[in-house]
Amino acid sequence: MATAVAMTYPITDKIGFWRRFAAIFIDIVAVGIVSSVLNALVFGGDAVRGNGLSTLLGLAYYLYFWSSYGHGQTPGSRVLGIRVVKTTGAELTLVEAFIRYVGFILSCIVIFIGVIWVAFDANKQGWHDKIAGTYVVKA
């Protein structure tokens, strides 16, 4: 089994709300398309059973790409030249990526206040970034 080699990146160029929003939008569209196709193939389009598949697919997607395996870059992040790192500049482990994912879900549940927080925070961190101890920086 191959293991990821963790890298360290500079944390000086933190990324603001709109660029991060564009990256997550690209990722949501990509995961949504793949999820819809898999749901149609596996469950015949049954939305109730497909929700579990969509949740699992989204979790696997973000855990992989936010961790050192994906070097902190989802495909949407790569397009926009950004990456997720710890506040030390190191890449995230799978556990840290999971913590960030849970924080992201919580940030979205409260009418996206935790996500919008990025626009007003001095370190350009959303609640999920603060919970996980991460920054989104220029790649």
Image (cartoon, helix red, strand yellow):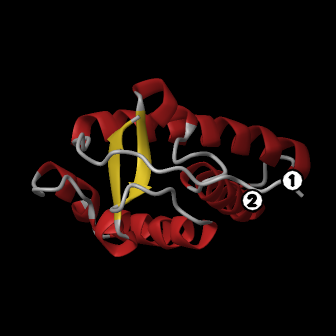
Name the disc covering residue 138, or none: none
Residue for point 77% across, 63% down: 49
Residue 70 on image: x %, y %? 62, 46
Residue for point 34% across, 48% down: 136
Residue 41 on image: x %, y %? 89, 42
Dot 1 crowding, Cα within 10 Å, few <14, some 14–19, many 20+: some
Asked if residue 41 lies left or right of residue 113, the reply is right
Q: Secondary structure at mark 1?
A: helix
Query: Disc 1 or 2, which lies upstream in sequence?
Result: 1
Residue for point 28% across, 67% down: 127
In the rendered image, the residue lying farthest to the top is: 79
Identify residue for label 1.
43
Residue for point 43% across, 42% down: 83
Asked if residue 34 lies left or right of residue 73, the reply is right
Residue 101 on image: x %, y %? 50, 65
Identify residue for label 2.
53
Quarter that holds the C terminus: top left
